[in-house]
Image (tube, helix red, strand yellow):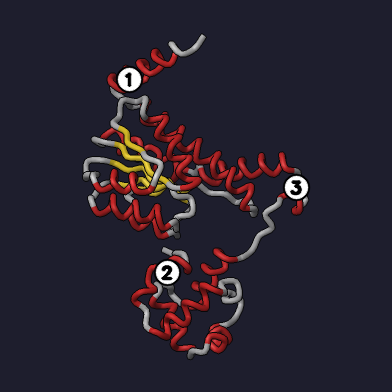
Amino acid sequence: METSVIYAIKTNYSEMNGTEKKIADYIIKNPIAAVAPSIGKLSEEIGVSDATMFRFVKNLGFSGYPQFRICLARETTPIDPVPARQGLDSVDAALESARNALKETFTASTHESVKMAGKMLLACKRLFVAGMGGSGIIAEDFYHRFISTGLDCHYAEDLHTQLILAAQSKKDDVCVLFCHTGIDIDAISIAKEYYLHECPIIVITCNNRVPINKYATLSIFVLSTMPSPIVETYSERVASMILCDAIYIEVMSSANKSCIDAVNSVRRVLDTRRF
């Protein structure tokens, strides 16, 4: 599995020797400049031998320097964030991006993953929902859907409370963890805690190369092909919301009477707050 170069460097930094830290410091400070050169030129620029650079790359878990460069390029290549400067109307760009994200996300494998996620949620004793930042917004929406089902659901917005919940999880619970980038340190720390307690984790992230998948019992990928971080953020959110709907429908289509009664009870009490 390919991983983030910057994440790999930072997580292994404390165990590096002086020469390795010299390479690591250069790449962290100059990630874009480190992409283009050959191994010889980069080694010369940093002041180390080619062999040392090669060992550094291998120790990070990459098959060789070419794979290292490709992964670093994916993280650092600058993109024009404004669709209008790419000749796209703003409305058309948003719609096209959403269509592409939905098309790429909902493949045959996603259908199978949704069915598996539904089975896991119906069988769990408690459902924990987690996510930070923008992914936390999706997580809260997922939690809002499922608190009406009668499942024992738990969610918190801040990191410390999420870690406290994770520390009390057990192997007959399930955590649904949203982390679109797959490299967020806080989300990974949450995943590690659930993993430590043998709690099954459904990770919803961007692809199979990101490090958070290491802790996943089941990974479901929300994909976006739009080359703009502004538009990509919204298209990813649209696809994530529909994925949440799909999992909810999967659960309710196989739910027992107590779940149906819980939904009806919620509808009844909310109806009292309407004119």
Q: Nearer the viewer, residue 69 or 182?
A: 182
Would you place residue 257 above or below residue 53 in this image?
Answer: above
Q: Which mark is residue 174?
A: none
Q: Position of residue 164 (x, y in %)?
A: 28, 46
Tell me which residue sits at (47%, 45%) in the image. Answer: 135
Give the foreground label among 2 and 3. Answer: 2
State which mark lies toward you, 1 or 2: 2
Residue type at mark 3: give it: Leu
Q: Is residue 89 left or right of residue 99?
A: right
**Residue 8 image offset from top left, x and y in percent:** 42, 68
Q: CA distance from mark 1 to mark 3?
A: 46 Å
Q: Residues within 10 Å of mark 3 (few under 14, many from 20)?
A: few
Residue carrying label 3:
88
Residue 51 sits in quarter: bottom left
Give the tally of numbered discs.
3
CA separation, marks 2 and 3? 38 Å
Compared across the picture, whether 166 is left or right of 17 comes to left
Q: In what element is the residue under mark 3?
A: loop
Pointer 2 residue:
10
Q: Which quadrant of the view contains residue 260?
A: top left
Q: Earlier in the sequence, mark 1 or mark 3?
A: 3
Amino acid type, callout 1? Ala
Query: According to the image, label 1 marks what residue?
Result: 262
Q: Residues within 10 Å of mark 2 (few under 14, many from 20)?
A: few
